[in-house]
Image: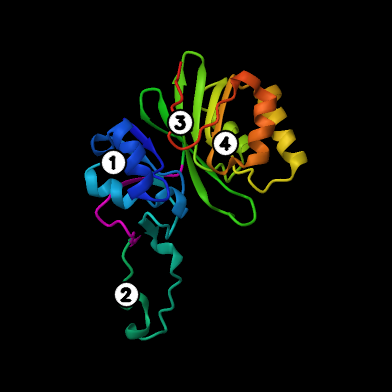
């Protein structure tokens, strides 16, 4: 089983919903879409009930999930005395940044990565002011009807994420998750809704989280009975 993101409040969201329906204590793998607190808040709870779970997370230098940092970030100046130099002038080949979950088994991802047959992670980077350079992972499933794409917040833009899935498959059958249109002007919301329906030719869409109420309305109108509101606790059947 796979858990995609872990919510904002582990005690409420994970315990009441995931524990009963997905048996989170026995999950094999978790995927953290990005570093924001409303997607990592339940991670402490997950690790408490399932400390050995493998967690895929976006790789960012000095990021929340730790990991290696190239020593080339340090410019040496040999004229300084050793006491004024980093590591006394003997910089190790690799540095590591820390994480607030030191016992977690993180696998950090920054490129398209297949984690199991027919299951991949797509890595994209936001170019949007306010979330500039934020790395985000999306989970992609291959199905007989096309790709099913699970998104966290779509900070890089849902169309950017869909472009990144092309390397893993062709037709996108369904999108599930947050599209981050919560503060987007209506004309742009209408454009995105039309593009997903007419250009990307999605068969189904199940938006939730940060998609926003105006976008829920626009997508419901655009997709009709091919729309499912994916609020907390919603079960979306995959064909």
Residue in view at x 43 percent, y 27 percent: 235
- Residue tagged by mark 1? 54
- Residue 8 percent coordinates (x, y): 42, 50
Whole-number angstrom distance, CA of label 3 to CA of label 2 = 52 Å
Outermost residue, right side: 187
Res. 105 visible in picture: no
Sequence order check: which comes first, mark 4 or mark 1? 1
Sequence order check: which comes first, mark 3 or mark 4? 4
Residue in view at x 40 percent, y 27 percent: 119
Sequence order check: which comes first, mark 4 or mark 2? 2
Instruction: Point out which mark residue 161 bears.
Output: 4
Q: As drawn, is 176 to the left or to the right of 225?
A: left
Instruction: Point out which mark residue 234 bears.
Output: 3
Q: Secondary structure at mark 2?
A: helix
User: Is residue 213 a member of the stretch shown in magenta?
Assistant: no
Whole-number angstrom distance, CA of label 1 to CA of label 2 = 33 Å
Q: As drawn, is 199 to the left or to the right of 230?
A: right
| 219 w.r.t. 61: above or below | above
- Residue 113 percent coordinates (x, y): 42, 34
Circle 2 residues within 10 Å: few <14, some 14–19, many ≥20 = few
CB of mark 3 within 8 Å of CB of mark 1? no
Whole-number angstrom distance, CA of label 4 to CA of label 2 = 41 Å
CB of mark 3 within 8 Å of CB of mark 2? no
Residue in view at x 46 percent, y 51 percent: 38
- Residue tagged by mark 2? 87
Quadrant of the rendered image containing residue 107:
top left
Q: Which residues are magenta?
A: 95-110
Nearer to us in this view, 115 or 146: 146
Viewer-nearest of labels 3 and 1?
3
């Amino acid at each position: 089983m796979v858990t995609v993101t872990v919510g904002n409040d582990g005690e409420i969201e994970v315990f009441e919903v995931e524990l009963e329906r997905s048996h989170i204590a026995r999950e094999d793998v978790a995927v953290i879409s990005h570093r924001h607190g409303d997607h990592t808040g339940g991670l402490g709870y997950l690790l408490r009930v399932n400390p050995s779970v493998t967690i895929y997370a976006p790789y960012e230098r000095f990021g929340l999930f730790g990991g290696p940092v190239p020593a080339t970030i340090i410019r040496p100046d040999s004229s300084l005395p050793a006491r004024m130099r980093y590591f006394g002038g003997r910089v190790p080949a690799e540095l590591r940044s820390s994480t607030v979950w030191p016992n977690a088994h993180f696998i950090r991802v920054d490129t398209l990565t297949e984690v199991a047959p027919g299951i991949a992670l797509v890595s994209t980077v936001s170019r949007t002011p306010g979330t500039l350079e934020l790395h985000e992972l999306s989970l992609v499933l291959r199905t007989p009807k096309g790709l099913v794409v699970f998104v966290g917040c779509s900070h890089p833009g849902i169309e950017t994420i869909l472009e990144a899935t092309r390397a893993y498959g062709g037709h996108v059958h369904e999108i599930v998750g947050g599209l981050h249109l919560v503060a987007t002007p209506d004309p742009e919301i209408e454009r995105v809704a039309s593009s997903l329906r007419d250009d990307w030719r999605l068969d189904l869409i199940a938006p939730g989280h940060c998609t926003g109420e105006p976008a829920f309305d626009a997508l419901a109108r655009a997709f009709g009975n091919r729309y499912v509101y994916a609020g907390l606790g919603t079960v979306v059947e995959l064909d």
